[in-house]
Image (cartoon, rainbow, N blue to C red):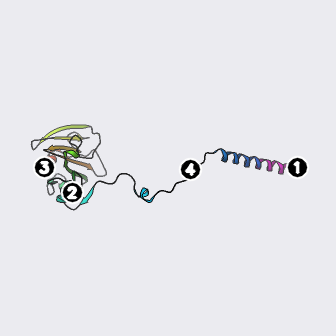
Amino acid sequence: MKKLSKIIGLLMALMMMLSLAACAKESAPEEPAEEPVAEEEEEMVGMPNPWSDVDSAEAAAEGAGIDLFEPAEGVEISLGKVEVEQYRCMDGIAEARIPIAAVDMTIRKGKMSAATDGDISGDYGEYAHEWTQNIKGLEVKCFGNREGESTRTIWIVDDYAYSIVAYGAGGDTDYGLKADDLNSLINAIQ
């Protein structure tokens, strides 16, 4: 008799568990069936990249629709000689990427129509210091986390906006170019 009551108890417990599982399944909201995604939708993720890689400063200027782009190639600054690794362009902006010592530097020239308040740098960081320098008779705006060292530098000449962004290797925004380096670069950039 004891065996029979144990078996009945186990069967009742099993039936209760099955009953609860069935109730839970019935009350759970149904997940919508996945709709097939068209092949075009799968391929398109985010915005298309507006930049095109090109092989020279002339090609970058032409691709950007500007008259001339000279990013100070060959100029000596405290970090060494400026040698462009990559040229790119998009509508209205030409760009040169320059790795130099432990710094990643980007120089841009663009039409004012491509600029926001004269800033085509693409650097939207907040900096501890902001100041203006006069270089080559130009009002040059500088931004940096160290006083007197500019991470983002912007200026305007006629209908063109210019920028130099210099980060330490790995994106260190505490790095900045000193006044002598900015003077050498800005005097050579056209």
Where disc 3 sits, the SS reads helix
Q: What's the CA distance linking mark 4 and mark 3?
A: 63 Å
Give the Cα separation between the discs numbered 4 and 2: 47 Å
Estimate the x, y position of residue 171 in percent, counting from the top left.
30, 49
Question: Judging from the image, what secondary structure is the residue with disc 1 in?
Answer: helix
Neighbor class of circle 2 (other Cα within 10 Å; few <14, some 14-19, many 20+) is many
For the residue marked with disc 1, what is the amino acid? Lys
Residue 53's x, y, as percent? 26, 59
Are the residues at dot 4 and dot 2 in contact (C-beta closer than 8 Å)? no
Return the residue at label 3: 184
Inter-mark Cα distance, 3 to 1: 99 Å
Disc 2/disc 1 C-alpha distance (Å):
91 Å
Give the residue at mark 1: 2
Q: Is residue 10 magenta?
A: yes
Answer with mark 2 or mark 1, whichever residue precedes in sequence: 1
Q: Nearer the viewer, mark 4 or mark 3?
A: 4
What residue is drawn where x is 86% and y is 48%? 5
Q: Earlier in the sequence, mark 3 or mark 1?
A: 1
First in sequence: mark 4 or mark 2?
4
Does the rendering let one see residue 183?
A: yes
In depth, the one of 159 and 120 nearer the eye is: 159
From the image, tell me which residue sits under label 2: 63
Residue reaching furthest right?
A: 1
Whether residue 146 appears in magenta in the rendering, the answer is no
Q: Which residue is mark 4?
A: 32
The secondary structure that most of the magenta stretch takes on is: helix
Which residue: 17% across, 43% down?
Answer: 155
Q: Magenta span covers which residues?
A: 2-14
Query: Distance of mark 2 from mark 3, alpha carbons?
Result: 26 Å
